[in-house]
Amino acid sequence: MSSELTHAAIAADTLAVAPNWRREVRDTLVLTAPIAAALLAEMGMGVIDYSMSGHLGPVALAAAGLGLQLLFTPMFWGMGAIAATGAVGAQAHGAGDAEAVSESMRQGFLMATLLSVPIMVIALIAIPLLPLVNEDPAVVEQVGRIILIGLPWIPLVYWFTVIRNFVTVMQRPNIVTICAIAGLPVSFLSNYVFMYGNWGAPKLGATAVGLTGVIVAALHLVMIVVYVEAVPELRRYRIFARLLHIDGKMMAELFRVGIPIAMAYLFETGLFFTVTVLMGIISTEALAAHNVVLNVCAMTFMIPYALSQAATVRVGYAIGAGQAEAARRAGYVAVWLGVGWMMLGASAMLTMPHLLTAIYLDLSDPANAAATQLTASLFVIAAIFQIVDGTQVTTQGALRGLKDTNVPMILCGLGYWVFGLGSGVTMGFVLGYGALGLWWGMAIGLAVSASLLFLRWRRLSGRLIA
């Protein structure tokens, strides 16, 4: 580590600890805005994938949605573990420990590489099981190809995530926004060429979404690596040096904090994935409607998800700096901002469901009538659980800033799977409410998790002050 990385130099570059609520709101929004813009741009790529495949028909839309879910669900498990680099790095940054910041990122690259192997195996295992979850052979064939083509997507995203956490801890997340925005036209162009077979390329149909994901992920990784190496304040941390060196203590810390986060991600994404599979069992129309509503929900979710990342950094930095009151304030600000945003999202779903559906499905096509009608009904339920979804994700982010991950993991598992999936299956299949019952179950699961997590944050943050 260079001698220029003195404690004073680091302190001059660290996040400020806000002295009051108004300042905390401002600083949280400043940190959140570029993260949110990047996440929304990344979700915009999902909209491009869904809308372009949707114009090929309900079968293509169902295949694209299921294929992306089968890649994203296991991918998110690993991303949960990698999130530990942000929590550990933020506390080290607040304490002025530059070496710990650097080493947390270097070991993060090793963690990302190690995790990518089993995650890719899990994705591959899903292929022979596809006929069990969808009876349409056309959907099964396309989903299998999406998974095979999209496998390199996983390690590329993991390595990018480590660097994204680093620049966020260093309060330089704007590059993440630039990367995401640059990916939008590339995503559209790739789908235009390979999905529809333009410019002499093979016509891959919905399968093209897997190839597009790999292309965009490679672009993002190259861009952010170039940025870190080009900025002297970031380059001096030498996060790309000694990447094969294993620091047992730091690696153990990352896994200790990260594995429970990964399990919480597993519980949540596993719930959504299981519901997606069950939708396919109900009907192709139910799966298509579910994919539309879930994608819109994912778009609105990106704001509280960004607030969650900002909360981890701001709470973690305040803890590292020994400022308990600032840590408590940072967590509450993130939670209430997240709830406020989700109320706006819920209002949009209640007032303009057909306009949102038209982004994905041709409303004038009689073949889409059943999916369109079901989509409007699902938006009503989605509007309700938007608020509790925003609460649970921001509260988790605040708790991660305290490195509190074990108990939240248990609370998420209880809420999502016992209350959420249990009630959803009961209402959907036993009581015969179908797709609507499954979505009510998800709403119940998220509400239980949000309540328990918020009570956990309230208790721990109060204990800090006491």
Image (tube, grey):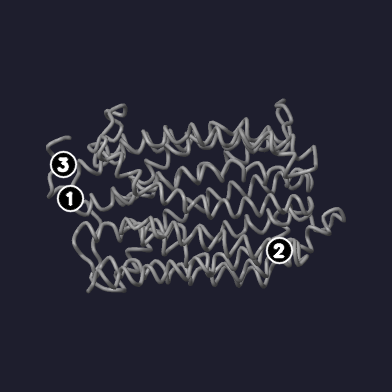
In the image: residue 120, left or right of residue 136 = left
The residue beneath circle 1 is 96
Secondary element under disc 1, as helix, strand or loop, is: loop
Q: At x 74% / y 52%, what residue is drawn? A: 288
- The amino acid type found where label 3 is placed reads Leu
- The percent coordinates of residue 157 (x first, y second) are 47, 39
Q: Nearer the viewer, mark 2 or mark 1?
A: 1
Query: Which residue lies under the disc numbered 2?
Result: 355
Dot 2 or dot 3: first in sequence order is: 3
* Foreground: disc 3 or disc 1: 1
Spatial CA span between label 2 and label 1: 50 Å
Amino acid at circle 1: Gly
Task: Determine which residue is flagged by label 3.
Answer: 5
| Residue 145, picture quadrant | top right
Give the vertical position of 214 relative to 257 (above or below).
Answer: above
Quadrant of the rendered structure where residue 131 is? top right
- Taking 358 as reference, is 121 left or right? left
Measured Cα–Cα span from mark 2 to mark 3: 53 Å
x 36%, y 48%: residue:
84
The CA distance from mark 3 to mark 1 is 9 Å
Q: Position of residue 208 (x, y in %)?
A: 67, 35
Left of 251 or right of it: where is 357? right
Looking at this view, is 58 or 135 the one in front?
A: 135
> Compared to 218, does 80 lie above or below?
below
Residues packed near mark 2 inside 10 Å, few (<14), some (14 to 19) or many (20 plus): few
- Count how many numbered circles sit on residues in the image: 3
Q: Which mark is residue 254?
A: none
Determine whether the residue tagged by mark 3 lies in a helix, strand or loop.
loop
Question: Circle 3: is it few (<14), some (14-19), or many (20+) Cα within 10 Å?
Answer: some
